[in-house]
Image (spheres, rainbow, N blue to C red):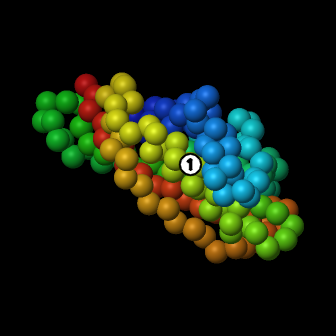
C-alpha cells in the first residue's frame, strides 16, 4: 500500500497543473494584490522530494519551482477490513530564487497563497478512495544562499484521508 503516496502525489500534481490550478490562482492572487509574479511553467512542477542543494548540483534547478511529495503514510485502520484506511501527509514545496533579497519573501507568500487557493478549491472527494478535508499548514524557511543568489522555500503540508482495498 506504499504506492498510495505516489498516487496521491500524482493527484495533487494534476490539481496544480489543471486549468483551474496553480497558474489560474497565481493570476487571481496577483490581480487582488496588484503585485505581479510570473506564472510557473508545468515543467517546473515536480513529484520529487529533493533538497534545493542537491537539485542545483545534479540537474540544474529551475526557479520558481514546485515540488509535490508524500511525507508520511499512516494506516490507522479507520475501516477495519480495508487494505489501507488512514492518512497520507503531503507536502507542496515552493522554491523562489532571485539575485536580490528585496521582495523575495513577498513573492514566496504570493505563490504559497496560490497553492493554498488550489487546495481550498479542491476540498472533498478526489476519487480513488482519496478525500481532502481542506486543512493545511504553511512553513517558511529562512533565506539562504543558492539558486540565483538567494533562495527561500515555503512548504504547504496537508493530510489526505484514504480508504482503499
Evaluate whether residue 47 shows in this view: yes
Evaluate whether residue 152 shows in this view: no
Q: How far across and how far down the image is residue 84, in percent?
A: 26, 35
Q: Is residue 16 rendered to the left or right of residue 33?
A: left
In this rendering, the answer to whether 116 lies above or below 104 is above
Q: Nearer the viewer, residue 73 or 11?
A: 11
Q: Secondary structure at mark 1?
A: helix
Identity of the residue drawn at 52% across and 66% down: 139
Q: Is residue 1 rendered to the left or right of residue 41?
A: left
Q: How far across and how far down the image is residue 140, in percent?
A: 57, 68
In this rendering, the answer to whether 45 lies above or below 10 is below
- The image quarter containing residue 23 is top right
Please tell me how crowded label 1 is: few (under 14), some (14-19), or many (20+) other residues with Cα within 10 Å.
Answer: many
Identity of the residue drawn at 25% across and 25% down: 165
- The image quarter containing residue 147 is bottom right
Q: How far across and how far down the image is residue 121, in percent?
A: 46, 39
Q: How far across and how far down the image is residue 87, in percent?
A: 31, 45
**Residue position marked by numbered label 1 in the rendering:** 115
Amino acid at each position: 500500500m506504499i504506492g498510495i503516496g505516489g498516487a496521491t502525489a500524482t493527484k495533487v500534481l494534476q490539481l496544480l497543473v489543471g486549468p483551474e490550478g496553480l497558474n489560474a490562482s497565481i493570476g487571481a492572487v496577483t490581480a487582488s494584490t496588484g503585485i505581479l509574479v510570473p506564472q510557473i511553467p508545468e515543467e517546473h512542477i515536480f513529484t520529487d522530494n529533493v533538497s534545493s542543494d542537491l537539485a542545483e548540483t545534479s540537474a540544474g534547478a529551475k526557479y520558481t519551482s514546485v515540488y509535490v511529495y508524500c511525507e508520511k503514510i499512516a494506516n490507522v485502520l479507520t475501516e477495519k477490513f480495508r487494505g489501507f484506511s488512514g492518512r497520507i501527509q503531503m507536502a507542496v514545496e515552493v522554491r523562489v530564487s532571485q539575485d536580490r533579497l528585496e521582495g523575495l519573501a513577498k513573492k514566496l507568500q504570493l505563490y504559497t497563497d496560490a497553492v493554498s487557493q488550489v487546495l481550498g478549491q479542491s476540498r472533498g472527494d478526489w476519487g480513488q478512495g482519496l478525500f481532502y478535508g481542506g486543512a493545511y499548514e504553511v512553513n517558511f524557511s529562512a533565506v539562504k544562499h543558492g539558486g540565483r543568489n538567494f533562495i527561500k522555500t515555503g512548504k504547504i503540508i496537508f493530510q489526505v484521508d484514504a480508504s482503499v482495498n
